[in-house]
Amino acid sequence: MAGHGGHHRRQNRKPKGRPLDGWLIVDKPSGMGSTDVVTKLKRAFDAQKVGHGGTLDPLATGILPIAFGAATKAVPYVMDSTKVYRFTLKMGDERDSDDADGKTIATSDYRPTNEQLEAALPAFRGDIMQVPPIYSAIKIGGERAYDLAREGQVVELKPRPARVDVFELVERVDDDTAIFHVQSGKGVYMRSLARDLARAAGTVGHIAALRRLRVGPFREEHAIPLDSLVVTGDTPPPSPALLLPVTTALDDIPALAVTEAEAARLSFGQELSLVEFMGRVPQAANPDGGLVRVLSGERLMGLCRLGEGLLRPERWLARG
């Protein structure tokens, strides 16, 4: 190799690891960041390319979809999908991080009744505006908010739109503690919901425990505990048979059947009028910017977006 120019050498270098494609649904333990999980699994599987489908706070447990190889291309669709959480609100103590990992910044002796908590919930359902926690990965002038917060800087975050479909009180454990169930769209911070609900009910509070139960089509029954995957010593690496197919990530997206001729036109990047699809567009699809999975027979061809009366190819998956 020594005789070749540096440029040539770089081109020939094969990526390290095995080329694996698919999804691994991990049950993340508390006390570990999402990127740490990715690093551990990349090493455990000796995989070339690994990413995750939506960050979970270190404190949180539950479903963390891990994308291998070609699955990384579907990450944006997973991040956009419905998520289900259960969290424990600890009342009377507000933290700078809005969860149990932070420092206390406000206290209150007031404890709302269940009726008062219930009465505060409707304001947080539907399309709402939400101020993210200062300890979040949002960028402010190119810097991550949590880096600025750790440096002791005053972080001012603007409210941003969030969609909450379900927000319910599940159980009042004791005076200080209540458990909630949430179903939400992308970019909703549970820590902000907990903080803001406590304030709306006349007290302050933070998340003491948080578990993610679902991300799009991925549910608890798919989840594998991290410690059963990352094993030490001479044990063989985990089996690639544990990976779900790449397309599983898209199972929640409404399906639209097309003919071979329509599929061919879409594969060339043509936009088709929705008039051609009258009666075929699934009811669950949002005609104003929603996605559909395009199927020809049983075969997944790609993803298209609806809008302005047109069906536009967004990501074509079928080859040839």
Image: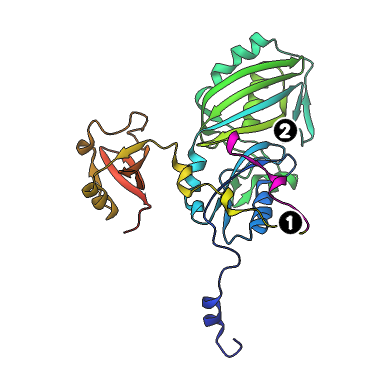
Q: Amino acid at mark 1?
A: Thr
Q: Is residue 59 left or right of residue 294?
A: right
Figure quadrant of residue 235: bottom right
Q: Is residue 132 left or right of residue 309?
A: right
Q: Position of residue 112 (x, y in %)?
A: 70, 12
* Left or right, 73 with reference to 212: left
Is 2 above or below relative to 268?
below
Q: Is residue 210 above or below residue 243?
A: above
Q: Which residue is mark 2?
A: 99
What residue is drawn where x is 59% and y is 52%? 142
Q: Quadrant of the C terminus?
A: bottom left
Q: Which circle's residue, 1 or 2, is located before the other in the chain?
A: 2
Q: Residue furthest bottom?
A: 3
Residue name at image x 70 percent, y 32 percent: 98
Q: Is residue 231 magenta?
A: yes
Which residues lie in the magenta part?
220-233
